[in-house]
Image: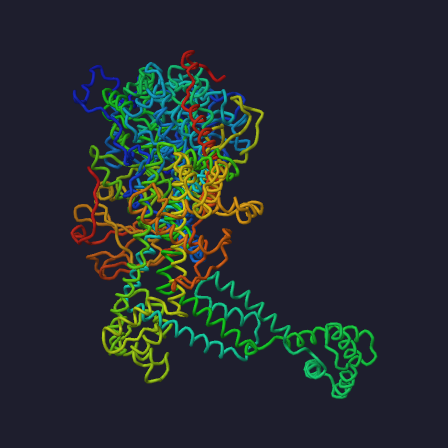
C-alpha cells in the first residue's frame, strides 16, 4: 500500500517525511488531531493509522499564500485550444469523512469544505486535471426541498456561501476560505469554474418575487419534474425582447462575486432558461473585467420544443452565439450509439457547426456528468477507460470527468429512499437520483474501488499532452472498417503537420470485434506501438499495406502513431475545427 | 486581504477597455431548423405525398424496432387505411351489382374522409375563427417530419411561430396588451384551447365519423349509380361493336357446354358428398361467390333427394355391410358364418337405425362370447362401424344424378351466355331497375311529377301514409297552379329524350351493322384470320384464352389459337370453318354474298320465333312499352283534370251522344261521369264490386262508362289539349292503341299485372301484358314513388338529425374555449404558499 501511495503521490509522500508540519487550522479539543496540509484523505488515513504524524494541539492561523505571484486567468484560451481537462466536484462531499460508515455525513463525520478540499488537489493534479468544475456553493433552500441538505441547484441566495462547506474552526471568513481554495488550485495550475444554478428555491421565490417567472394565476412556475425549484424570469417583455433588469443585475452581481472569490469562469446550469441576448449581456459584462473569464453552457442538442413544461427549448447554437466558449453536447448518450456511423456523424456535425461561430468553440467530454448514471453501469471499469481514451483523442473537445470516475464509483447509496431524523430542510427523505452523484444530502465522498481507472485516465491525458497539437488542432479523418458487419469498430485518424495517429475503438462492451481498418498509405512494415496502457481483454493488431487488421477485446481502445504524412490527400473525407 | 492567486485582472486599478465593438450584433436566437406550415383547413397534396413516402420508410424502421412514438402512430394510421382498403376490395369481390361493388370503396373513402373532415370543419375552423388559435396547425420539425403544433401540450415549438402571429392570437383571445408576460399568457391560453379542442374532437369523433360517412354514402350513391350507368351503356355498346367479341362469346358458350359435360363425366364415380358438391358449385358458379353459394345449397338438396331415392338398405346389401364390418373388426370366420343367420332372420324389412343397433348388439354378443363387459364395449364399436358403412353406402354416386347435373350445366352455360353481349346490351338499357337507363328515366319522370304535385317528402316532415284521395287532391291543386305549364313542358322533354334513347329502330340498326361487319369478316376466313383479330390486345379476352388453355402472359399465336379452337370444337371438318362456327352459334347464315348475309342478319335481329334474340327483344320491348305508357297515362291524367277544372270535360260529357246518338247524359249522370273519369284515370280499376255492378250491369252505368271511355280514349273526337304537337301526336297513338286493344275488346277494366293478353292482330306483340300497354296509374306511381323517397329519406332523417344535433353541441362547446384568467391578471401576483 505504501509503495502504491509513493508512486501516486511522490511529492506528498516525501513531504510527510520532513519533520516540519504546517497545519492550517486548530482542531477541536474533542476531536482526534488531524493533518490539514496538502495530502489526500487516503494518505492521511493511512498515516494516521500508522501513527506517524503527531499534530500540535494549538496552531497558528496560517498565511494564505507564500510568495506574491501575479496570477492571470487564461481559461478562455484553454477552452479555445481544447486544452482544458475538467473534473466536476461537489465541495460538500469531495473530501468529506464518513467515519461512521453509513454514507451519510452526520455527527462524528466531517463534511467536505473548501479547506479540506485542498488536501486532494495534488491528487487531482496527478490525474492530469487542470480545471475544476465546482458545483454550486450557495446555501440550498429549505422549504419544499429535496433531500436532507437541499439540492445544490435550489439556492436560497445566489450571493452567499453555504455554511456547511465552510470550516468553522478556521477564523477566516467564508470568502477567504474560498479564495484560499482557488489560490491553492491556481498554484497547481488548476483553474476553477463555479456553477451557477438556473433556478431558485421556494425560499428565494418568497424573498425575491421580482426575479421569478409567474404564471397567469400568480403562481411561480416550476419546471416539469423539478418540484423543489422555481423558474427565474429573464423577460420584462418577451414580445419586445426586453430583459428583466433585476435578473440581469443579479447575474452581473454573481459574476462579480465569483470573480472576487477567485473563480476563472462559470458553468451555467441549464443555459436555455435564459435567452441568448441575456447571456450575451452577462458574458460581455464579465469580459469587461476579465477577458479570459470562461463560460461553459449546459446545453445538449437542438430541440424543436422543450419536452419539459415551463422550460425553454434547448438550442446549443444560441448559447455559442451568445458568447459561451464551450457546451455540453451529446456525449452522455455515447453508450447508446449503436455503431461507428453515429459516432462519426456526431463529431462531424460538431466540426461543421464550429464554422458558424467564432473560432475555437468546443464541446466538453460530457460522457458522464452529475446528471448521468455512473458509467460503470454501461460497461464496468473497461468502459470508463475507453471513455478516457476517447476523450483524449477526439477533436473539438475539452475533456471532462466527474468526481468518482477516476475510481469507478457507482454512485449508489445505502440511504437511498430512506428517511433520516436529522435534516436541514423540511424533508426527512434522503432523496437521491439512484445511480447518480448525490446532490441532495451531506454524504460520503465519491470514491470507488477501481483506482486503476484513475491510472489509465492519467496516462490517457498524458497521451493528449504528448500529442497536444495533433489532438487539439489536428484534422479528423473517419476510417472505413472492413469485415466488421456490426459496425462496432470505430476508427479515425488525427493528423497535423505530417504527423498522424490512428485510434481504434471497440464500442462493444460485451464481446470482441474484428475487422480491417483501411488506411491509405500505410505500409505493412509500420510498427504499431499502442500509445495507451493495455487493459481488459487482449487485442491483436497487424499492419498490412493499406490497412490494420485488428481483433479488439471488448471495450478496448488502441492508438498508434503511423507514418502517413499524406493521409489528408488520400481521398478520404477530412474534417477540421474552426480554429 | 488580497490573494495573489486570485485573478489579477480584477484587482487592477485601471479599468479594462472592453473588447466589444460598439455596434455589436445582439445575439437573438438562431433561426429554428423546422418551420411552420401555412394555417389552412386542407393540406397540400404534395405534402401528403411526401408524408406517405416517409411513412413507407418508417415501415422498415418499425420492423427493426427503431421507430419512435410519432412514427408508430403514423404506421398505425397507414395500417388502418391499408387494412380497410383490403376489406373493401374483398367485399367488392363478393357483391353482385356494380353499384354495390363501387359503394364498398365509397364507404371506405367516406369513412376516412369523415375522420379528416369532421374536426376540420366543425372544431378547428370555428375555434380558429373565434379565438385565432388553429388547434390543428402543423409544422415540420428539424427531421423533416410533419407534426401537429399542439399535438403534445407539453411540447409546443413556439420558437417556430413568429411574434406577429402570437400577437395576433393574443388580440383575438382578448388578452390585454398591458398584460405582464403577455407572450406566456397567450401561449398558455392557446395551449389550453388546443387541449380543449382536441378533447372535444376525441369525444365526438366516435359518433361523428360513422354519421358523416353514412350521409356521404347516402348522397354519393345516386351519383355512383349515374356514373356506372354511363359506363355500362358505353361498354355494352362497345362490346356490341366489337365483332371479335361477338364471335368469341358464342364460341365460349359452346365451349362452356362441352366443358361442363366433360366435367360431369369425370365425376361419375365419385360420391355426391360435400366435397364433390363444392367442386361442382365452384365450377359452374361463373366465378361469382353468391351464385356458387346458391348452387351449393341447391346441389345439397339434390344430393339429399338422391339419397332418399337411392336403393334402400335391405338384407342383400346389408350382408355386404356386415361382412365389411366383420373384416374391420377382425372377427373369426366362425363368427362370420353365424352372421348369415342374423341376416336371414332379419327378413326383407327395410333397415333402419334401430335395426342397426339390434344387429350391432348381436354381433357384439357373438364376438364377446358371453363376456358381458366386453359385449357392452363392442356394441358401441359395432354400432359406430355399421352406421358409418351404412351411411357411406347410402351416398349416391354422382353418376346417379348425371342428367340433372347436365341440365344444370346447360342452365349455367346459358346463364353465362345470357350475360353475354346482347343480354348485357339490353339489360343496361331496359331492365326495370333504378341502375339502368330506363330505370333512371322512369324514376326521374316520377320524381318530377311527385315534386310538381307538392308531395315530395321532406326530411323531417311528411305523413306516414299517403291516401288516394290526397293524391287526387294534389292533382287538382296542381292543374290550377302557376307551375302547371312549365311542368308539362319539362315532362314533354323527358318523353322526347326517352323516345330518342329507346328508339328500337336505331338500337337494332346499330346491331345489324356490326353483325354485318362480323359476318363479312367470317366469310371465307380461316382460324388464322380470326385469331389475328382476337390477339389484338383485348384485356377482356384473357379469361377466355385461359379457359382455352393459354397461360397468363403466354404469347398467343394465331396458329396456337387456331389449334385451340380445333381441340375444343372437335374434329368435324365442317365445324372447323369459322363461318361454320359463326353460323351455328348465331344462327346467322353468312352465305356467299352480302345480300344473303344482310337478310340473314335482318332475320336474326328481328328475332325469329323461338330464338333467344326474339326472347330478348320481347322482354326489352315490354319494358319500354310499360314505361312510356306510364308517361302517357300521367299526361292523360293531367289533361283530364285540367279539362275538369276548366269545364271542358263537363261540356264534352253534356254534349256527348249516348245510347246510339239518341240521348245525352243527365246532369246527375254528367256529375257521376266526371267522378268516374277521375277515378278511372287515376286508379285504373273499378274499386269494388258495387262499382263493377253499376258500370257493367246497369243501363245508366253503361252509358256513363261508354261516355267516359270515349272522352278518355277517343282522341279524334276529344284530343289531348296539353303539351307540344309532338306529344299530342304520341298521345293520339297511345290512346288509339289502348282503345283498339283493350277498351273496344274487353269490357272488364281490371288488369292484374300478370294477366297476359293475346292478340292475333299484332305479330310481334305476343305476350304483351295489358298492364304494359295501359301504363301505371298515377296514384300507384305517386304513392310508390313517395314511399321510395321516404325510405331513402328515412335513414337520412335519422342520421341527419343525429348529425345536426352533434354539430350543434360541438359548436356550442367550442364557444367556451379560449378563455383566460382575467381576474388574476387584474389582481396581480399571488403566491402558492
* Number of on-image labels: 0
Please report the residue visible at 60 percent of the width from the left and 76 percent of the height from the top: B396
The residue sitting at the front extreme is B662
Residue B602: which quarter of the image? bottom left
Q: How is the image coloured?
A: rainbow
> How far from the left and from the top, in percent, is residue A366?
35, 38
> How far from the left and from the top, in percent, is residue B717?
36, 46
The residue sitting at the top extreme is B827
Please report the residue visible at 55 percent of the width from the left and 79 percent of the height from the top: B399
Q: Quadrant of the N terminus of chain B?
A: top left
Query: Does residue A80 sit above or below B113 in this rendering?
Result: above
> How far from the left and from the top, in percent, is residue B796?
46, 39
> How far from the left and from the top, in percent, is residue B291?
48, 63
State the residue in front, A486 or B319.
Answer: B319
Residue A69: which quarter of the image? top left
Please report the residue visible at 30 percent of the width from the left and 31 percent of the height from the top: B160
State the residue in front, A82 or B335.
Answer: B335
Q: Is residue B210 visible?
A: no
State the residue in front, B440 or A133.
Answer: B440
State the residue in front, B236 or A335.
Answer: B236
Q: Is residue B508 visible?
A: yes
Query: Does residue A85 sit above or below A147 in this rendering?
Result: below
Query: Does residue B734 sit above or below A404 in this rendering?
Result: below
Amino acid at each position: 500500500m505504501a509503495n502504491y501511495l509513493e508512486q501516486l503521490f511522490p511529492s506528498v509522500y516525501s513531504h510527510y517525511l520532513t519533520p516540519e508540519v504546517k497545519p492550517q487550522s486548530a482542531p477541536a479539543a474533542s476531536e482526534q488531531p488531524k493533518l490539514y496540509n496538502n495530502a489526500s484523505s487516503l494518505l492521511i488515513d493511512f498515516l494516521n493509522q500508522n501513527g506517524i504524524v503527531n499534530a500540535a494541539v494549538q496552531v497558528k492561523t496560517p498565511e494564505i499564500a507564500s510568495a506574491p505571484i501575479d496570477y492571470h486567468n487564461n481559461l478562455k484560451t484553454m477552452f479555445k485550444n481544447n486544452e482544458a481537462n475538467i473534473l466536476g466536484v461537489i465541495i460538500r462531499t469531495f473530501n468529506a469523512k464518513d467515519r461512521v460508515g453509513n454514507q451519510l455525513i452526520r455527527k462524528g463525520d466531517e463534511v467536505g469544505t473548501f479547506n479540506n478540499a485542498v488536501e486532494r488537489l495534488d491528487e487531482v493534479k496527478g490525474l492530469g486535471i487542470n480545471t475544476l468544475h465546482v458545483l454550486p456553493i450557495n446555501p440550498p433552500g429549505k422549504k419544499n426541498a429535496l433531500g436532507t441538505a437541499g439540492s445544490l441547484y435550489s439556492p436560497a441566495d445566489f450571493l452567499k456561501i453555504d455554511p456547511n462547506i465552510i470550516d468553522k474552526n478556521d477564523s477566516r471568513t467564508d470568502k477567504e476560505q474560498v479564495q484560499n481554495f482557488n489560490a491553492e488550485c491556481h498554484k497547481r495550475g488548476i483553474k476553477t469554474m463555479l456553477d451557477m444554478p438556473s433556478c431558485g428555491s421556494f425560499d428565494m421565490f418568497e424573498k425575491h418575487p421580482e426575479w421569478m417567472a409567474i404564471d397567469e394565476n400568480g403562481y411561480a412556475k416550476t419546471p416539469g419534474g423539478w418540484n423543489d425549484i422555481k423558474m427565474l424570469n429573464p423577460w420584462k417583455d418577451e414580445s419586445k425582447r426586453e430583459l428583466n433588469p433585476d435578473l440581469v443585475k443579479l447575474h452581473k452581481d454573481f459574476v462579480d462575486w465569483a470573480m472576487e472569490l477567485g473563480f476563472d469562469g462559470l458553468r451555467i446550469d441549464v443555459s436555455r432558461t435564459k435567452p441568448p441576448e441575456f447571456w450575451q449581456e452577462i458574458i460581455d459584462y464579465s469580459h469587461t473585467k476579465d477577458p479570459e473569464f470562461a463560460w461553459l453552457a449546459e446545453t445538449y442538442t437542438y430541440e424543436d420544443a422543450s419536452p419539459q413544461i415551463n422550460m425553454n427549448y434547448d438550442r446549443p447554437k444560441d448559447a455559442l452565439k451568445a458568447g459561451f466558449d464551450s457546451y455540453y453536447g451529446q456525449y452522455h448518450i455515447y453508450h447508446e450509439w449503436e455503431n461507428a456511423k453515429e459516432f462519426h456523424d456526431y463529431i462531424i456535425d460538431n466540426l461543421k457547426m464550429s464554422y458558424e461561430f467564432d473560432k475555437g468553440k468546443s464541446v466538453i467530454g460530457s460522457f458522464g456528468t452529475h446528471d448521468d448514471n455512473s458509467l460503470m453501469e454501461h460497461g464496468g471499469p473497461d468502459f470508463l477507460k475507453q471513455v478516457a481514451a476517447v476523450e483524449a483523442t477526439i477533436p473539438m473537445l475539452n475533456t471532462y470527468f466527474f468526481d468518482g470516475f477516476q475510481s469507478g464509483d457507482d454512485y449508489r447509496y445505502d440511504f437511498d429512499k430512506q428517511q433520516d431524523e436529522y435534516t436541514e430542510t423540511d424533508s426527512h427523505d434522503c432523496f437521491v437520483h439512484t445511480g447518480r452523484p448525490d446532490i441532495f444530502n451531506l454524504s460520503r465522498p465519491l470514491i470507488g474501488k477501481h483506482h486503476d481507472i484513475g491510472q489509465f485516465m492519467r496516462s490517457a491525458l498524458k497521451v493528449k499532452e504528448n500529442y497536444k497539437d495533433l489532438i487539439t488542432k489536428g484534422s479528423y479523418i473517419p476510417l472505413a472498417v472492413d469485415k466488421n458487419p456490426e459496425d462496432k469498430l470505430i476508427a479515425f485518424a488525427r493528423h497535423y503537420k505530417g504527423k498522424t495517429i490512428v485510434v481504434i475503438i471497440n464500442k462493444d462492451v460485451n464481446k470482441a470485434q474484428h475487422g480491417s481498418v483501411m488506411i491509405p498509405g500505410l505500409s505493412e512494415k509500420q510498427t504499431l506501438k499502442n500509445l495507451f496502457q493495455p487493459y481488459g481483454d487482449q487485442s491483436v493488431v497487424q499492419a498490412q499495406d493499406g490497412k490494420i487488421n485488428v481483433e479488439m477485446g471488448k471495450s478496448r481502445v488502441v492508438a498508434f502513431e503511423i507514418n502517413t504524412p499524406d493521409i489528408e490527400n488520400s481521398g478520404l473525407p477530412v474534417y477540421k475545427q474552426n480554429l | 486581504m488580497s490573494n495573489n492567486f486570485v485573478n489579477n485582472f480584477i484587482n487592477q486599478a485601471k479599468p479594462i477597455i472592453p473588447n466589444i465593438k460598439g455596434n455589436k450584433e445582439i445575439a437573438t436566437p438562431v433561426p429554428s431548423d423546422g418551420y411552420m406550415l401555412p394555417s389552412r383547413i386542407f393540406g397540400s397534396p404534395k405534402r401528403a405525398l411526401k408524408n406517405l413516402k416517409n411513412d413507407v420508410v418508417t415501415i422498415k424502421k418499425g420492423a427493426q424496432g427503431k421507430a419512435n412514438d410519432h412514427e408508430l402512430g403514423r404506421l398505425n394510421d397507414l395500417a388502418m387505411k391499408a387494412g380497410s382498403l383490403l376489406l373493401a376490395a374483398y367485399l367488392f369481390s363478393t357483391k353482385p351489382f356494380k353499384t354495390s361493388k363501387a359503394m364498398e370503396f365509397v364507404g371506405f373513402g367516406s369513412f376516412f374522409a369523415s375522420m379528416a373532415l369532421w374536426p376540420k370543419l366543425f372544431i378547428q375552423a370555428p375555434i380558429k375563427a373565434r379565438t385565432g388559435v388553429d388547434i390543428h396547425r402543423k409544422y415540420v420539425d428539424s427531421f423533416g417530419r410533419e407534426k401537429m403544433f399542439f399535438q403534445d401540450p407539453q411540447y409546443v415549438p413556439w420558437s417556430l411561430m413568429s411574434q406577429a402571429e402570437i400577437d395576433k392570437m393574443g388580440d383575438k383571445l382578448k388578452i390585454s396588451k398591458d398584460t405582464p408576460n403577455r407572450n406566456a399568457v397567450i401561449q398558455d391560453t392557446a395551449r389550453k384551447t388546443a387541449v380543449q379542442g382536441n378533447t372535444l374532437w376525441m369525444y365526438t369523433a366516435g359518433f361523428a365519423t360513422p354519421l358523416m360517412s353514412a350521409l356521404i354514402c347516402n348522397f354519393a350513391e345516386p351519383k355512383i349509380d349515374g356514373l356506372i350507368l354511363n359506363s355500362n351503356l358505353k361498354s355494352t355498346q362497345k362490346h356490341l361493336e366489337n365483332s371479335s367479341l361477338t364471335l368469341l362469346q358464342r364460341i365460349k358458350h359452346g365451349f362452356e357446354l362441352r366443358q361442363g359435360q366433360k366435367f360431369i363425366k369425370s365425376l361419375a364415380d365419385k360420391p355426391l358428398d360435400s366435397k364433390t358438391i363444392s367442386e361442382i358449385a365452384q365450377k359452374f358458379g361463373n366465378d361469382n361467390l353468391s351464385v356458387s353459394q346458391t348452387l351449393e345449397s341447391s346441389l345439397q338438396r339434390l344430393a339429399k333427394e338422391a339419397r332418399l331415392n337411392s336403393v334402400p338398405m335391405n338384407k342383400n346389401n346389408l350382408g355386404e355391410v356386415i361382412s365389411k364390418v366383420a373384416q374391420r373388426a377382425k372377427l373369426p370366420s366362425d363368427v362370420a358364418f353365424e352372421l348369415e343367420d342374423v341376416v336371414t332372420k332379419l327378413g326383407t324389412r327395410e333397415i333402419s337405425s334401430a335395426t342397426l343397433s339390434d344387429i350391432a348388439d348381436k354381433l357384439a354378443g357373438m364376438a364377446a362370447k358371453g363376456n358381458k363387459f366386453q359385449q357392452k364395449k363392442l356394441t358401441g364399436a359395432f354400432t359406430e362401424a355399421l352406421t358409418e358403412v351404412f351411411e357411406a353406402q347410402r351416398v349416391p354416386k354422382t353418376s346417379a344424378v348425371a342428367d340433372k347435373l347436365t341440365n344444370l350445366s346447360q342452365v349455367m352455360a346459358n346463364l353465362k351466355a345470357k350475360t353475354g353481349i346482347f343480354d348485357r346490351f339490353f339489360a343496361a338499357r331496359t331492365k326495370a331497375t333504378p341502375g339502368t337507363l330506363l330505370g333512371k328515366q322512369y324514376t326521374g319522370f316520377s320524381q318530377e311529377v311527385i315534386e310538381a304535385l307538392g308531395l315530395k317528402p321532406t326530411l323531417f316532415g311528411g305523413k306516414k301514409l299517403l291516401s288516394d284521395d290526397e293524391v287526387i287532391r294534389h292533382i287538382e291543386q296542381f292543374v290550377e297552379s302557376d307551375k302547371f305549364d312549365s311542368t308539362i313542358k319539362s315532362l314533354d322533354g323527358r318523353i322526347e329524350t326517352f323516345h330518342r334513347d329507346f328508339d328500337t329502330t336505331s338500337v337494332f340498326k346499330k346491331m345489324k351493322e356490326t353483325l354485318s361487319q362480323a359476318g363479312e369478316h367470317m366469310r371465307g376466313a380461316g382460324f388464322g384470320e380470326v385469331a389475328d383479330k382476337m390477339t389484338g390486345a383485348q384485356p377482356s379476352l384473357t379469361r377466355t384464352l385461359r379457359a382455352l388453355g393459354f397461360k397468363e402472359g403466354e404469347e398467343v399465336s394465331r396458329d396456337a389459337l387456331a389449334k385451340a379452337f380445333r381441340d375444343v370444337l372437335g374434329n368435324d371438318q365442317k365445324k372447323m370453318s369459322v363461318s361454320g362456327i359463326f353460323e351455328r352459334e348465331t344462327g346467322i347464315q353468312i352465305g356467299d354474298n352480302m345480300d344473303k348475309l344482310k337478310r340473314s342478319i335482318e332475320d336474326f335481329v328481328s328475332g325469329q320465333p323461338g330464338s333467344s334474340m326474339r326472347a330478348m327483344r320481347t322482354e326489352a320491348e315490354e319494358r319500354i312499352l310499360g314505361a312510356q305508357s306510364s308517361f302517357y297515362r300521367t299526361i292523360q291524367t293531367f289533361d283530364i283534370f285540367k279539362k275538369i277544372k276548366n269545364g271542358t270535360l263537363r261540356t264534352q260529357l253534356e254534349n256527348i251522344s249516348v245510347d246510339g246518338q239518341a240521348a245525352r247524359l243527365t246532369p246527375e249522370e254528367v256529375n257521376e261521369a266526371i267522378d268516374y273519369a277521375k277515378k278511372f284515370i287515376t286508379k285504373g280499376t273499378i274499386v269494388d264490386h258495387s262499382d263493377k255492378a253499376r258500370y257493367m250491369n246497369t243501363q245508366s252505368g253503361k252509358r256513363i262508362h261508354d261516355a267516359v271511355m270515349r272522352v278518355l280514349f277517343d282522341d279524334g273526337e276529344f284530343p289531348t289539349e296539353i303539351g307540344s304537337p309532338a306529344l299530342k301526336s304520341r298521345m293520339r297513338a297511345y290512346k288509339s292503341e289502348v282503345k283498339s286493344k283493350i277498351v273496344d275488346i274487353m269490357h272488364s277494366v281490371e288488369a292484374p299485372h300478370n294477366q297476359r293478353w293475346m292478340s292475333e292482330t299484332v305479330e310481334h306483340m305476343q305476350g304483351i301484358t295489358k298492364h304494359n300497354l295501359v301504363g301505371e296509374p298515377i296514384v300507384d306511381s305517386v304513392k310508390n314513388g313517395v314511399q321510395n323517397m321516404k325510405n331513402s329519406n328515412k335513414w337520412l332523417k335519422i342520421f341527419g338529425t343525429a348529425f345536426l344535433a352533434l354539430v350543434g353541441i360541438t359548436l356550442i362547446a367550442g364557444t367556451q374555449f379560449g378563455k383566460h384568467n382575467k381576474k388574476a391578471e387584474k389582481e396581480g401576483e399571488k403566491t402558492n404558499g
